[in-house]
Image: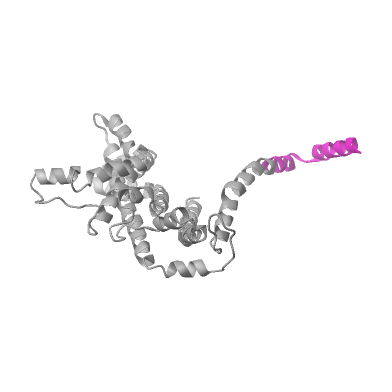
Amino acid sequence: MSVQSTVLRHTRYRDLTARHKEWVLGYAMLVPAFFFIVGLVAYPAAWAIYLSFTDKVIGSPEKFIGFQNYVWLTQWPNFGRMIWNTVLLAVVGVAIKAFVGMTMALALNEQFLGRTVIRALLFLPWTVPAFVAGLIWRWMYDDQNGLFNWALLGIGLIDAPISWLGDVRYAMAAVMSVVVWKGFPFFAIAYLAGMQSIPSEQYEAAEVDGANAWHRFLYITLPGLRHVMLVTCMLSLIWTANTFDLVFIMTRGGPSNATEVFTMLIYDQGIRNGRIGEASTAAMMAVPIFAGLIIILTRYLQDSDEERA
């Protein structure tokens, strides 16, 4: 019976047309990817969503409590402050990173001596681990022994040391400067690669027509980098909104919650207090925003491709 079944299966496979064989092979090759996606993405995400509706505490069985965690989170005393800090850090930080990255890419796209070395050095902030970067910048912002106060006092711009990380007026700006420093190389490298793909004939033709540098940037470079700019800004927006390590090392959310972002609440509830249910709820609150941004970006890119086709 087993031999007959094997012969029957082989006979059926041989009877398939080339198109059907290609179809079967294609789906067979998708099977490993399907299990990877389910195991590494779908299952953990579904489990996190489920936990957000429970009172799960580490070491105790969970109980389904509906939307109580979501109600609790919206009534959290610093909920509005955390949302504002996260949006401020993400939106303003990404805007500055995009501006600095574009400036660096335009400069490095020109021919000058040492360009290769400077391009290599551009990666340096991006390669430094966030933990190390946070420690270095915390020392530079230190109000007693920090580099900035020493330099500003030395040239006479200030009369007394400034508590950059301990003053609510400067703390967020100090953290944001480190986020920009660590993230702008990603924009610069992506924009530089995008500029290399723009045909030089377009710039040559524009010069012949009398276009100056600003017009060439406005009408050739920017449209040519449109997709790159959208993707980099969207990715960086998600990464920056999820920033935790730099904030934790530099200020731990202080002073007076001036730098407390959403990820700090997730850490406090999930790691320090072991309350996985509340931590999952805080994480799930940001998912619709990020999912909406990704859907908008995907639709825009698809529409652009259809227009070009």
Residue drawn at 36 percent across, 65 percent down:
78
Q: Nearer the viewer, residue 246 or 125?
A: 246
The chosen color scheme is one colour
Quarter residue 59 falls in: bottom right
Q: Residue furthest front?
A: 59
**What segment carries the magenta color?**
1-26
Chief secondary structure of the magenta portion: helix
Within the magenta stretch, is there residue 305? no
Q: Can residue 247 be seen by looking at this rendering?
A: yes
Q: Is residue 46 left or right of residue 236?
A: right
Residue drawn at 30 percent across, 39 percent down:
204
How many discs mark residues in the rendered view? Answer: 0
Q: Residue furthest right?
A: 1
Within the magenta stretch, is there residue 8? yes
Q: Is residue 256 above or below residue 37?
A: below
Q: Position of residue 9 (x, y in %)?
A: 83, 39
Q: Can residue 210 be seen by looking at this rendering?
A: no
Q: Position of residue 236 (x, y in %)?
A: 39, 50
Residue drawn at 35 percent across, 40 percent down:
126
Q: Is residue 72 above or below residue 169?
A: below
Q: Nearer the viewer, residue 17 or 239?
A: 239
Q: Is residue 73 left or right of residue 11?
A: left
Q: Position of residue 309 (x, y in %)?
A: 50, 50
The quadrant in which the N terminus is found is top right
